[in-house]
Amino acid sequence: MLGAATERSPDRIGKVGARTSPAGRPTPVSATDSSLVKSTPGDRPMPGKAVPTEGLTSMTTDLQQHPTGRSSAVQTPSGSPILRVDELRKRYSDDGPLVCDGLSFSVDQGDFVAIVGPSGCGKSTMLRMICGLLEPSAGEVRLRDQKIVSPPPEMALVFQDYTRSLYPWLSVERNVRFPLAKRRDLSKEEKAARVAEAIETVGLTGFESYHPGQLSGGMQQRVAIARALAFRPRILLLDEPFASVDALTKEGLEDTLLDVQKQFADSGMTMLLVTHDIDEAIYLADRILVLSKPPCAVAEELVVDLPGPRSQVETRSLPEFLRIRAHIHDVMGLSAQRGGTRGAARSTA
Amino acid sequence: MTLVSEKNEVRPDGAAAAPTPRRPARKFRFRVNLRGLAFAVGLVLALEALTTWYVRSAYVPRPSEVFAALYAELLRGDLIRDAGQTLQTFSLGLLFATVAAIAAGVVLGSSPRIFSAFKLIIEFLRPLPSVALIPFAILILGVGGTTGVAMTAYAAFWPILFNTYYGVRDADPVAVDTARNFGLSRPAVLRRVLLPSAATNIAAGIRISAAIALILAITVEIITSSGGLGYYIVRMQTATRTEDMYAGVVAVGILGYVINLAVAALERKVVFWKTDVRDGGAR
Ligand SMILES: Nc1ncnc2c1ncn2[C@@H]1O[C@H](COP(=O)(O)OP(=O)(O)OP(=O)(O)O)[C@@H](O)[C@H]1O
Ligand SMILES: [Mg+2]
């Protein structure tokens, strides 16, 4: 099946071995090129040297005008992935069912990886293990070859349960400032500026003194996103971050994510986005991990090779977009029928 | 950024249509409960009629006599001074209890291991009626004001302790995980997440403890004859100044009512984000 799909669109959907080597990143010029350009192992990313990026409007910039655009913003091709998830297994209790069964994948710095999978398959569980909040039953997560045992300071998770994740006794402004409180390296003014910027990014300027209980669900969700943005993690994990906002706001926030990622210093913010919305996954991500029915494993890993910069209307109507979508539907339908048996390369023929 | 914003938040020119920022309504609105007031007045009048025409006893004065006595005693200043002393014992006891119980409750609630170490002794002491310890306290601390404060604090300690404990223990794990995710240390999570999470419970505990603290303050005063409203009542009783004795009782009632109002107002102010403040388990 996978082979068939690859045959149908050899230049659009690149299948990457689910548990082999870290996925290569498509270069921007390879939009019509079939080859997946493997990043060459080289020097480590140079911290501190920021890539010049323009303001939020820069997302309309063409690749020609902006040669250090999205993907090529990786200054040095990262030899080792920033994040490596290795054979993660999770059982919540000794006699409980297996929730995750051998999750393996890796993420390069600056990657935008989307994760889709059926409800209840263990996506949230996986994210909680990745960011060090939940101990895996087996396997490990490595951040730059360091095993993660507690929440690393450069990672942030936007929880699916945003209502419970916000602090009802703090105003919007104080909720967003919450993660910055103990940061000694930032002055009061810098913190205030960051907070104001993050709140403005999600379109909540004017609501700073409101309390979460006075906001709508979608607004609360945006506060949670703003809080993570103010924190400026190197790796941002998002669990269904746009589930409660309307379609238009959602599109705006999606583009905001792309902007934020691009603007982040060095080679961009690394994003892991769990979503139920396949279109959203295709639109945003460089790579998509399709998870199987519970217990979850990576059923398939796709490289999304859509031309950038992406635009809500055009990108979504590209034939490639539609083809990838049909393919993911196929894979998800299949993995549902397989009933949890994993095996990325398993053929149904 | 107009895309992200909702229509009513942003004007076409991009300027935020600044919504009036406001905190949740926490103004203390004093509504007179007319029905309740009418019933209370009616009851007093009925009592007045009863004591005027049917029950004629030196030990059951008419309400009008009691209020007249209360007024006279207030003018004389004795009652005021005694009420002040009771209020002082009460406040000090409740304050010590609150500080100690919140600290202990947070520690117990955040560590199952510590809790299991203390569990047995807590479960033994909790059902023990505090008044049973008054003789013991008198032996140790004498009949001065210290005994009153110590006993008040002891009795008021438990409801706050348990409410804090349950509040901290039942804090939302997602809220805690969020803080851990942002790199907060254990003490920081305690202070910035667990404690505010438990605020509702703590406030309910303080409300319960306030009532208990007043009981203990008066009881100790009655037993040790060490001044305060309790001792005033005993004094008037032994002097068979029945009206004045009842005036003392009414004064205690008024004090309790005012304390309750004050605690409820404080609760609304502190736990402003919760409209329904749950009741903790009274003891
Ligand atoms: N704290 C927990 N204790 C026990 N089991 C849990 C716990 N959290 C999740 N599970 C179980 O793990 C499985 C996966 O849950 P998880 O929340 O990770 O799914 P999900 O993929 O995020 O689903 P959704 O897309 O609906 O958010 C479920 O069967 C759930 O019952
Ligand atoms: Mg989930």
Image (cartoon, rainbow, N blue to C red):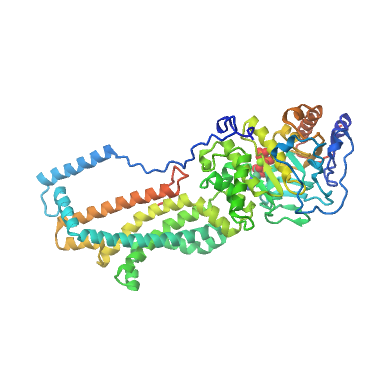
The C terminus of chain B lies in quadrant: bottom left
Q: Is residue A150 left or right of residue B258?
A: right
Q: Residue at x 54, y 34 (%)?
A: B17
A148 to A301, vertically: above or below: below
The total of numbered circles placed on residues is 0
In this view of the protein, can residue A348 be seen by the observer? no
Residue A175 is situated, as x and y percent measured from the top left of the image, at 56, 47
Q: Nearer the viewer, residue A66 or A346?
A: A66
Q: Nearer the viewer, residue A251 or A160?
A: A251
Q: Residue at x 66, y 36 (%)?
A: A253
Residue B275 is situated, as x and y percent measured from the top left of the image, at 44, 42
Q: Is residue A232 left or right of residue B195?
A: right
Q: Is residue B37 left or right of residue B153?
A: left
Residue A235 is situated, as x and y percent measured from the top left of the image, at 72, 48
Looking at the rendering, which quadrant does residue B188 occupy? bottom right
A276 to B60, vertically: above or below: above
Q: Is residue A82 left or right of residue B70?
A: right
Q: Nearer the viewer, residue B182 or B44?
A: B182
A188 to A197, vertically: above or below: below
Ligand 2 shown in quarter: top right
Residue A4 is situated, as x and y percent measured from the top left of the image, at 87, 31
